[in-house]
């Protein structure tokens, strides 16, 4: 049986600011090593990587024939 | 836990409950490796044995899903429709002829909530998508290759 879902903890603004700073620091380190990579794509990848596996989104959702968040 | 991670955790827990060894592949595996992609389903690979095929009915029951159905005549796989997603179970090997044993040997074990899941390597996922050659697979290749490059640059 699927286990009951726990309510996800919403990250605080402080958590998010810390995350943004860590991503920016890693991006500054990696961009020279990956000169052909689009900076926006690199930021997107790092933003995904730095978010814990348990807090990521994985699925597209369709409701009444439309994609929704 | 996000709702999405809960779904993956439930699937892995149900696999453990029915003693079905599986490797997560496809875009769910890519996202677990950090690729910024979304998907509609969870793809897993299992060994192609009569016993494993029988276990799918119990797996569907454990997940509260519909009975397994064939996906198409072209691939050896079954689909289990779930309340909020669906699970595709591929038997034996994926595109590029990469077999279950290879996927597991190359893959990594990841903790998702309270369970551990075998997740195929990004290299194998890229190989299989390139070999499959479908438009939806080719479309996602550039961002998977970039993710692999980032992982390597970060020493992972």
Image: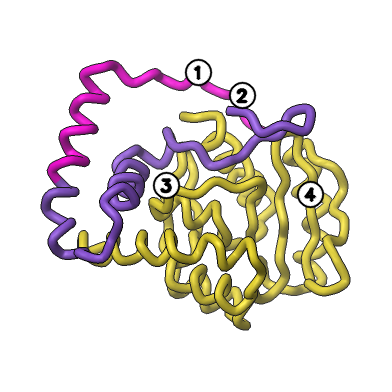
Chain colours: A purple, B yellow
Work out which residue is located at the far bottom of the displayed protein and give it: B97
Q: Which mark is residue B80?
A: 4
Residue at disc 4, secondary structure: strand
Q: Which residues are magenta?
A: A1-25
Q: Which mark is residue B111?
A: 3
Q: Where is mark 1, residue-wise?
A: A7
Residue at disc 2, secondary structure: loop
- Crowd class of label 4 (few under 14; some 14 to 19; many from 20; radius 10 Å): many
Q: CA distance from mark 1 to mark 4?
A: 26 Å
Q: Is residue A47 in view?
A: yes
Residue at disc 3, secondary structure: strand
Q: Where is mark 2, residue-wise?
A: A4
Q: Between residue B80 and residue A50, name the one nearer to us.
A: A50
Q: CA distance from mark 4 to mark 3?
A: 23 Å
In the displayed structure, A28 sits above or below B92; it is above
Q: Cβ–Cβ below 8 Å for labels 2 and 1?
A: no
Q: Which mark is residue B137?
A: none
Give yes or no for residue A13 being in the magenta stretch: yes
In the displayed structure, B92 sits above or below A15; it is below
Between label 2 and label 4, give the one nearer the viewer: 4
| Chain on which label 4 sits | B
Which residue appears at 49% of the width and 30% of the height?
A: B2
Which residue appears at 16% of the width and 34% of the height?
A: A21
Marked residue nearer the N-terminal end (4 or 3): 4
Q: Position of residue B132 (x, y in %)?
A: 64, 75
Quadrant of the frame with the C terminus of chain A = top right
Q: CA distance from mark 3 to mark 2?
A: 18 Å
Q: CA distance from mark 3 to mark 1?
A: 19 Å
Q: Position of residue A38 (x, y in %)?
A: 30, 56
Q: Same subunit under labels 1 and 4? A: no
């Amino acid at each position: 049986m699927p286990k009951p879902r726990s309510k996800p903890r919403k990250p605080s603004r402080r958590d998010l600011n810390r995350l943004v700073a860590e991503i920016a620091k890693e991006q500054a380190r990696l961009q020279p090593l990956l000169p052909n990579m689009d900076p926006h794509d690199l930021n997107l990848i790092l933003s995904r990587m730095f978010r814990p596996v348990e807090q990521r989104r994985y699925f597209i959702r369709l409701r009444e024939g439309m994609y929704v968040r | 836990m996000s709702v999405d991670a809960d779904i993956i955790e439930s699937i892995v827990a149900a696999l453990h409950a029915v003693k079905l060894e599986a490797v997560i592949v496809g875009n769910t595996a890519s996202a677990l490796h950090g690729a910024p992609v979304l998907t509609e389903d969870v793809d897993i690979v299992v060994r192609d044995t009569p016993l494993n095929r029988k276990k799918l009915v119990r797996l569907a029951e454990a997940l509260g899903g519909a009975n397994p159905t064939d996906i198409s005549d072209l691939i050896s796989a079954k689909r289990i429709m779930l309340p909020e997603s669906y699970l595709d179970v591929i038997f034996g090997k994926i595109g590029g002829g990469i077999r279950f044993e290879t996927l597991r040997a190359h893959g990594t074990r990841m903790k998702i909530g309270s369970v551990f899941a075998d997740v195929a390597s990004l290299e194998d996922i890229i190989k299989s998508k390139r070999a499959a050659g479908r438009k939806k697979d080719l479309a996602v290749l550039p961002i998977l290759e970039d993710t692999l490059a980032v992982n390597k640059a970060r020493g992972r």
